[in-house]
């Protein structure tokens, strides 16, 4: 009799518990869907070819957001140029060359720290080193360099993980056939890890594209009479633009605000989607 | 003629697994030398010392001499890359590289710097013929090596090694993952290959060892117990431990 | 036999090694420049003044306590909100949800991870703040609470991912052993699986905390930016200001090298050190969860 009651109580607890967790998950997930849907619905009316392709007018209250879109593209490209080579090579070092010693531990701790530094502190750093000390001024170059260092940890980590997931037997076989360490990496390990590496790069760049704080004092500007002509020019950028028009411009039409947000969201989530597709396609195609 | 001379070889990994204690041995050239004994006896370690593949593992100690062409290949400034081309290895599980059949077989040559397409094609064909695989794959060399059966994959792995025209071929339990028919096929192949190559094989069971051995060495817990001709070791072993293992009293 | 023929590799191997060490260089560089611009603050402003309770730069008050407490309040509040939802969802995904459901929900949560914080701040201003103002009947919706909600949304994906990973790593044999002894799935989760994933879950929480502490834009947009000492009971529902928001909003208006400028950098040093402590602790807690976190934290 006791056993039966105990079991029933446990079963009731389980039903309650499971439903509680279901509720918790629903509460977590619904706002996400709601958020995205709300932005899409509110912003879609503002989207038109003019919106994407023309410059703003009337103090940003009318016209398009082309300079901000172009600026974000430049910054993303700039970030890629610096962070991809360094990040991938550093990842290769950790996965294929580094021994398990104190130096490697320190490197790993350094990466964790880079990953955890608040984005606004990166902005300060960029201001101190690139804008002022190296005298680059508020520029695409300074902002890109700042964003690249911020993006490094993601790229290094995903690269290392992707390389480590390649079976060690390949390395052993390649070495036994007379290949050097670099030859093995270049011909076997790296190509096999490439989808994972690319996914990581895209995710890193996606984050860089959406960041505001690091570019606040290093490269972003609100009003630009023309598109940036050189890397030493400052630029408009979508995240910064959104920030200013939603907090500092009186009489800013709501629809343009939502439209701008929608454009950034599409850009960022689009990259996310591409990365996911690459990842799942690679997993399906894998021969080992 | 002696191909390889091993003198007082001692090897220890940092986790003390499968180490070797003071091994001295002479490998006859153009013959099949069999290393046999229970698991963990050091056979794999021994093989991997011969082609310095041990360098990839966590070695704590490596003492002694291994003389190949009158040079001790254990010294640090030996050209291990070249050594591995001369002493090739086939592993217990077929491990095709994620490349086409052609690229698998040509891999070692390409790494060595051979880029002449014609030469590569010729050498690949020669190696595949030596591995008795040419007839089965010559029409699909560009296919992935993974499209082949287990036995075919293992022969690709053998062809890969043969393409480099080595002097010695090491085989570590090469047929443990294959069925008996394929196994016997590969054993025939080895008897054919020994005419041109020195073969050192660590089979996964005593029966295979007895079938193919010209010479045999019995490894037990890192020590070399006995060494001699195949007939001697399997039919009239000198050491009681050898005869106990061969007759199945322990394993 | 000749020497190792790796000559052609020498260049590429050196390049790889150098970039391998580069992370250390960058951390040192960041610390160096923060110190360079921020330490001088201590010569113009004594420590007692910096750690006082009034932040009003225009009149020369540089007390950062309200900012520190503001950050702490929001971080703690958001962690308290995010924990149950984050871990609850992680448990649901890892232990209860059928695979097809998991395949739908995980990408949705990843979407949240991808939404830029400025977008969340935007929604915070336009949707959450007015809602809370009406619903909770408070003078303004731009409060610590709104900030905490947004921060919870921001840190939940991190917590869910790392915790779910940790739960997945628990060997199935543990669960099966527990069930074989007559425990229900629910009991197994709380008595066996979750404790086994302890370090991973703890790491997830710490990463979430780190993320909340370092967030700038979302809090800047919705917390009202009033540098008051949040010591009263209703402070959660009043405006507050974080360290991050202070730097972001005031840096644009200061003269380079001025006292205000230096103190802002000093706040940056504080943030840097705080995140250092949190992240080193998190990494000491676990090594495997760490590798996933290096990827997610960013």
Image: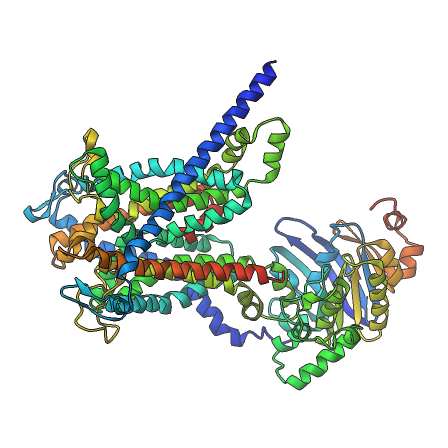
The answer to whether residue C29 shows anywhere in this view is no
Q: Residue furthest right?
A: B236
Residues A263 and C142: in front is A263
C70 versus A59 height, above or below: above
Residue A173 percent coordinates (x, y): 65, 65
Query: In which quarter of the view is residue C202 placed?
Result: top left
Q: Is residue C15 left or right of residue B243?
A: left
Q: Is residue C44 left or right of residue B80?
A: left
The answer to whether residue A194 shows anywhere in this view is yes
Query: In which quarter of the view is residue B145 placed?
Result: bottom right
Residue C290 percent coordinates (x, y): 45, 48
Query: In which quarter of the view is residue A226 placed?
Result: bottom left
Residue B171 percent coordinates (x, y): 76, 63
A85 versus A123 height, above or below: below
Residue depicted at x 26% and y 73%: A231
Residues B16 and C60: in front is C60
């Amino acid at each position: 009799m006791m056993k039966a009651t105990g079991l029933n109580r446990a079963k009731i607890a389980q039903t309650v518990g499971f439903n509680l967790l279901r509720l918790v998950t629903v509460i977590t997930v619904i706002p996400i869907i709601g958020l995205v849907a709300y932005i899409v619905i509110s912003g879609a009316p503002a989207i038109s070819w003019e919106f994407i392709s023309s410059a703003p007018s009337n103090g940003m209250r009318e016209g398009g957001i082309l300079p901000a879109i172009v600026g974000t593209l430049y910054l993303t490209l700039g970030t890629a140029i610096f962070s991809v080579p360094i990040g991938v090579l550093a990842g290769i070092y950790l996965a294929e060359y580094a021994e398990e010693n104190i130096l490697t531990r320190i490197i790993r701790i350094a990466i964790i720290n880079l990953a955890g530094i608040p984005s606004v502190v990166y902005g300060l750093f960029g201001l101190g080193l690139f804008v002022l000390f190296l005298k680059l001024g508020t520029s695409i170059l300074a902002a890109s360099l700042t964003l690249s260092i911020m993006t490094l940890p993601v790229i290094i980590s995903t690269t290392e993980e992707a390389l480590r997931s390649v079976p060690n037997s390949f390395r052993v076989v390649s070495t036994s056939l007379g290949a050097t360490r670099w030859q093995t990496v270049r011909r076997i390990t790296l190509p096999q890890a490439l989808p994972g590496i690319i996914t990581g790069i895209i995710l890193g760049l996606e984050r860089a594209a959406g960041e505001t704080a690091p570019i606040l004092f290093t490269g972003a500007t609100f009003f630009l009479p023309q598109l940036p002509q050189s890397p030493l020019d400052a630029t408009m950028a979508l995240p910064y633009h959104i920030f200013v028009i939603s907090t500092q411009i009186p009489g800013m039409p709501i629809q343009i605000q939502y439209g701008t947000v929608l454009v950034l969201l599409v850009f960022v989530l689009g990259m996310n989607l591409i990365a996911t597709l690459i990842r799942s396609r690679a997993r399906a195609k894998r021969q080992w | 003629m002696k191909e390889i001379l091993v003198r007082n070889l001692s090897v220890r990994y940092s986790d003390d697994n499968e180490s070797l204690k003071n091994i001295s041995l002479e490998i006859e050239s153009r013959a099949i030398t069999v290393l046999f004994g229970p698991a963990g006896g050091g056979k794999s370690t021994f093989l991997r010392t011969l082609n310095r593949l041990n360098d990839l593992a966590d070695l704590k100690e490596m003492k002694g001499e291994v003389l190949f062409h009158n040079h001790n290949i254990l010294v640090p400034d030996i050209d291990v890359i070249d050594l591995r081309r001369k002493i090739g290895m086939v592993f217990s599980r077929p491990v095709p590289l994620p490349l086409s059949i052609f690229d698998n077989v040509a891999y070692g040559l390409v790494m060595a710097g051979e880029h002449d397409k014609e030469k590569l094609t010729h050498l690949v064909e020669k190696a595949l013929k030596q591995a008795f695989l040419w007839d089965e794959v010559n029409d699909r060399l560009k296919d992935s090596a993974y499209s082949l059966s287990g036995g075919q994959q293992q022969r690709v792995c053998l062809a890969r090694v043969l393409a480099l025209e080595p002097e010695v071929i090491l085989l570590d339990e090469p047929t443990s993952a294959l069925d008996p028919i394929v196994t016997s096929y590969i054993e025939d192949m080895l008897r054919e290959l020994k005419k041109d190559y020195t073969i050192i094989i660590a089979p996964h069971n005593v029966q295979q060892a007895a079938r193919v051995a010209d010479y045999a060495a019995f490894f037990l817990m890192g020590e070399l117990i006995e060494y001699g001709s195949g007939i001697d070791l399997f039919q009239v072993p000198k050491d009681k431990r050898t005869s106990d293992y061969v007759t199945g009293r322990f394993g | 036999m000749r020497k190792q023929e790796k000559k052609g590799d020498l260049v590429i191997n050196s390049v790889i090694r150098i970039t391998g060490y580069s992370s250390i260089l960058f951390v040192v560089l960041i610390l160096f420049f923060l110190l360079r611009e921020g330490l001088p603050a201590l010569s113009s402003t004594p420590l007692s003044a910096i750690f006082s309770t009034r932040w009003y730069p225009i009149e020369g008050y540089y007390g950062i306590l309200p900012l520190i407490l503001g950050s702490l309040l929001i971080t703690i509040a958001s962690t308290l909100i995010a924990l149950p939802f984050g871990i609850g969802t992680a448990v649901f995904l890892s232990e209860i949800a059928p695979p097809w459901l998991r395949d739908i929900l995980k990408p949705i949560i990843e979407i949240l991870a991808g939404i830029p914080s400025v977008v969340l701040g935007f929604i915070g201003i336009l949707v959450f703040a007015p809602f809370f103002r009406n619903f909770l009947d408070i003078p303004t919706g731009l409060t610590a609470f709104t900030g905490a909600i947004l921060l919870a949304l921001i840190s939940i994906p991190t917590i869910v991912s790392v915790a779910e990973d940790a739960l997945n790593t628990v060997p199935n044999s543990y669960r099966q052993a527990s069930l074989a002894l007559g425990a229900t799935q629910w009991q197994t989760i709380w008595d066996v699986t979750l404790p086994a994933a302890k370090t991973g879950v703890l790491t997830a929480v710490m990463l979430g905390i780190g993320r909340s502490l370092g967030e700038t834009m979302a809090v800047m947009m919705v917390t009202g930016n009033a540098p008051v000492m949040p010591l009263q009971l209703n402070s959660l529902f009043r405006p507050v200001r974080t360290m991050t928001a202070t730097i972001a909003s005031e840096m644009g208006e200061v003269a380079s090298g001025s006292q205000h400028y230096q103190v802002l950098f000093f706040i940056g040093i504080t943030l840097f050190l705080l995140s250092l402590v949190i992240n080193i602790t998190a990494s000491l807690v676990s090594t495997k969860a760490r590798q996933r976190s290096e990827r997610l934290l960013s």
